[in-house]
Amino acid sequence: MTTADAPAVDLAPMWVPLLRRLTDTIPAWGLWKNADAALAGHGDFDSTAPSSDWAAITAAFQEWATEHGFGPATACHHVPGVLFLVAVDRANARLVELDVNARKYFRGWTMFRPEALAALMEIDERGFRRVRPGAEAVILLTQNGMRWGGRPDVPGLRRKRVADLLRSDPEGVAAAARLFGPARGALVRLAGRVERGGWSRPDALSVEAYAVARALAAPGILFTRVWAKRVKRRCPVLVSIFSNERRVPPDVDRWIEGVERDHVVLEAG
């Protein structure tokens, strides 16, 4: 059974206090996708904040993990621009995870940094900061709904309920489309087609071409993307996240020993 197939569980009582604490203490922090899915036990928590806030976020995560009996915890910095915070849930042989992006890429181009999302954030009724639905839909459309060559990822669009999110907040869609500069018109047209159950490959190609052109103007970022793909196959934390659906091996202590070779591991309690 994959994570997507697992029955929903209500993780809000456990996670919401941490999300509220980060909202209250770190103004530039917020969730940028998948909040509801993660609170139902499907996936991780994807957030954004400047790297200058990472130490405070790490401390809050470690304190929260200790309160809930998870540990040890560690912070993985192997992927440039991303902080992966994990703690061991020994009872279930899994990792609990909070990710923090200082920038998010699309086709090698920096699609957003935390400051670009500030105006697109809102306070959820549960008391934590998250990106508004239309903006989340635009991000999911590019991250999970578009294959290379301007082709649709139909399963990804359905799984992430992109059309529903687009329809729910047209103002948010228009605001988030500004992230794409001169390609924003193509992005809005594409979003309109997706809302109606269709697709526009010419518009998708325009959005993709804009991102690729911007990426080629910053070759250093392209190098970091290549590095990220390599390290995800070697780092034990990232292998557990990306290849094993956050599961840890039966010999947890041996896995932790491997993590300690190039991570700072913080014991619970």
Image (spheres, rainbow, N blue to C red):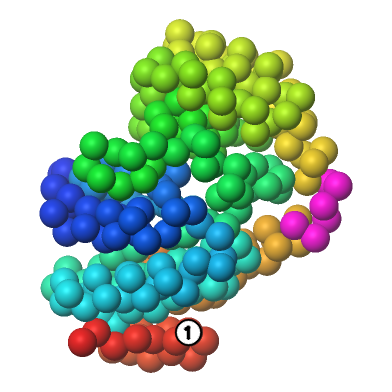
Residue extending farthest to the right is 217
Q: Find residue 203 and report its image quarter.
A: top right
Callout 1 secondary element: loop
Query: Which image quadrant for residue 68?
Result: bottom left
Residue toward you, 176 or 28: 28
The amino acid at mark 1 is: His
Compare residues 210 and 157 and report the one nearer the observer.
Answer: 210
Crowding at mark 1 (Cα within 10 Å: few <14, some 14-19, many 20+): some
Q: Position of residue 131 (x, y in %)?
A: 43, 38
Predominant SS of the magenta segment: helix
- Closer to us: 144 or 117: 117
Residue drawn 52% across and 22% down?
173
Is residue 44 placed above or below 77 in the rendered structure? above
Q: Is residue 95 above or below residue 267?
A: above
Q: Residue at x 24, y 73 (%)?
A: 65
Residue 136 is situated, as x and y percent measured from the top left of the image, at 45, 34
Q: Locate the C terminus and report the quarter of the image it occupies.
A: bottom left
The residue tagged 1 is 263
Who's the residue at 32% across and 70% down the image?
61
28 is within the stretch colored magenta: no
Residue 133, x across and y down, in percent: 40, 29
From where the camera sits, is residue 3 visible? Answer: no
Is there any visible trace of residue 122 in the rendered image? yes
Find the magenta span and give its range.
216-221
Q: Seen in the image, is 247 located left or right of residue 50? A: left
Number of numbered discs visible in the structure rendering: 1
Residue furthest to the top: 196
